[in-house]
Amino acid sequence: MTLTTLFDLTFTSRPNDIALEWDRAYTFQEIDHGANRMAHLLTNRGLQPGDRLCIYLPNSLAFIELFLAATRLGIIFVPINVLYRDREIAHILRDAEPAAVITCRDLLPHFTTTLPVWLVEEMSAKAIAEPTTRLCQVIDADTPAAIVYTSGTTGVAKGAILTQHNFVVNAINLVTTWQFTAQDRLLLALPLFHVHGLGNGIHCWLLSGCRLRLEERFVHDQAASWMQAFRPTVFFGVPTMYHRLLEWPESTARQVGARARLFVSGSAPLPVAVLEDFRRLYGHTILERYGMSETLMNLSNPYAGERRPGSVGLPLPGVRVRNLSPDGDPVPDGETGELHLQGPNLFAGYWRRPEATQAAYRDGWFRTGDLAVRSPDGYYTLQGRRSDLIISGGFKIYPREIEEFLAEQPGVREVAVTAAPDPRRGEVPLAYIVPEGAFDAQALEAACRANLASFKIPRAFISVESLPRTALGKIQKHLLPPPEPIA
C-alpha cells in the first residue's frame, strides 16, 4: 500500500469534513484538491519520479500540499531544517542533488546555489490555476517517499531513505495503538521537516480523519490560548514543551487536561520529574515513545496500560528488538545493552552511502546506538547513546542516571552530563546545570555523594544559561562550553 491509497480512506469518505485549521478552516476535499493542483504544477515544471525535491519551509498548508503532491508523483521529498544555515544547507544540496529547492522569501537569503530555487508564495499563487484532477504515478510500496537528514550531532548529516511502506506502517501502528478516531482534535506545533511532526503528526491526522490545528512553531506565550480555543484531545510534544507547560496556572492546566485524552512525548528523553509534575497538574500521564529518523517509531508506552516513568515502553506491532552486548551477545534483563531492531519500519539505507548503511547493521539487525535496559516484563528504559557512555577508571557511567537524579534536586531546571578527559581515570563526568533560582554547586555535590557511587559524582557542576538543542529538543552535548581544567 502507498500513502496515496492509505490517505484516500479519508479523502474519499469525509471530503466535506473540516480537516485543518490554518489561516482558515479547510475541508479534506480542499486539502486533496490543493495537493492535486501542486502535483500538476510540479509536473509542468519538469519533475519526474525519483527526482529529489528539497523543501526549506516552516510549517504551512503549502508544506503539506507539496508533500502529498510529491508522494503521488513518486518524487522524493527532502525536508531541510529551517534552523540550518548556509554550510548545513549546502551539504544537503550537494548530497541529495535535488532537481529544485522550494523556500519562502524570508529564508531565501540563506541560499547560495546554482540549483533552481522556487518561491513557495509564487507557486501557491500559480497552483490556483491548475486543475484539481488527481495526477498520480504508478509506484509501489518500496518507492522512496522521503530522504530525512540526521541531525549530524556526531558527524556529517546522512540522508535516511524512508519508503512509502515505512510511512504507511508507522501511521497504521500509531493510529491503532494510540486509538485515533475522526472525533479527535490534534494540536500540532512540531516542525514538519522532522519525522515527529511529519511521520507522526501529519500521518495520524490524514489516516484517522481527525481535525488538525497546525501552528508554525511552538510559542509558549500563545500555547495556552491555542489550547483553550481549539480544545485538543491529543497533543504531540517534546520534553522542552512539556517543561514550559508546567509554568501555566493550575486552573488553566486543569481546563486543558479535562478536554484532552492523550499527551505524547518523544524526540528526546522525558525527565521523570516532568512526567510526575505534569500528571499532578494536568491529570494525565504523558505517553513516552521512542523513534529515530531511520526507523520512525519503534517502541511506545501503552495507551491502555501502565505508562512507566522513565521508560519508552514496549515494541510496536511488527518491530523486533534485541538488546545486545558490544560483542553481539544478548544481555539479560536488568543489564544495559545496545538496542538492535528489525521490522517494516526500518529505512532503506543512507542515501548514496553504502558503507555507512552496511556499518549500521549487525547480522541483519539495525544498530541504533542507543543503550537500554529491559525489565522482566518487557519495558525498555533508555540509558543514553552508546557514544555518550563514560568509562571512568574501568567503571561504566550512564549519564542519564545522573541527569535524572540531578533533575530532582531543588534549583535545577535542566541538566546534561557529559565526559571530560582525566589523566588518572581516563574520563570523569561533568554536569552542566541550567539553574532555577540560586545555583549551589556544593549542595548538588553533597546530594550526589549521599546518593550515588563515588565514581558517578560529577567532578564539576557548571552553570549555563541554556542547553544547546536541536529543533526537536535533543541536547547537543558536543556544543556545550568546554570546562575549566580539572585539577
Image (spheres, grey):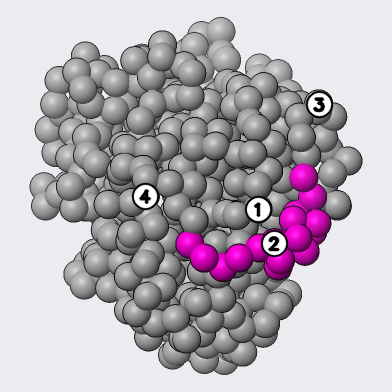
Alpha carbon distance from label 1 to label 2: 6 Å
Q: Which numbered disc, 2 or 4, marks the residue closer to the eye?
A: 2
Which of these two is toward me, 471 or 133? 133
- Three-letter code, disc 4: Phe
Q: Which residue is mark 1?
A: 41
Q: Which residue is mark 2?
A: 127
Q: CA distance from mark 1 to mark 4?
A: 24 Å
Mark 3 or 4, nearer chain start? 3
List x then y, in percent, for residue 395: 35, 21
Q: Which corner quadrant of the image does residue 141 belong to?
A: top left
Residue, disc 4? 167
Q: Verify CB contact (< 8 Å) between mark 1 and mark 2.
A: yes
- Relative image position of residue 484 (x, y in whole percent): 73, 23
Residue 215 rendering spot, x and y as whole percentages: 65, 69
Q: How far is mark 3 from mark 1, CA to CA? A: 21 Å
Going from the N terminus, do you reach mark 3 or mark 2 first? 3
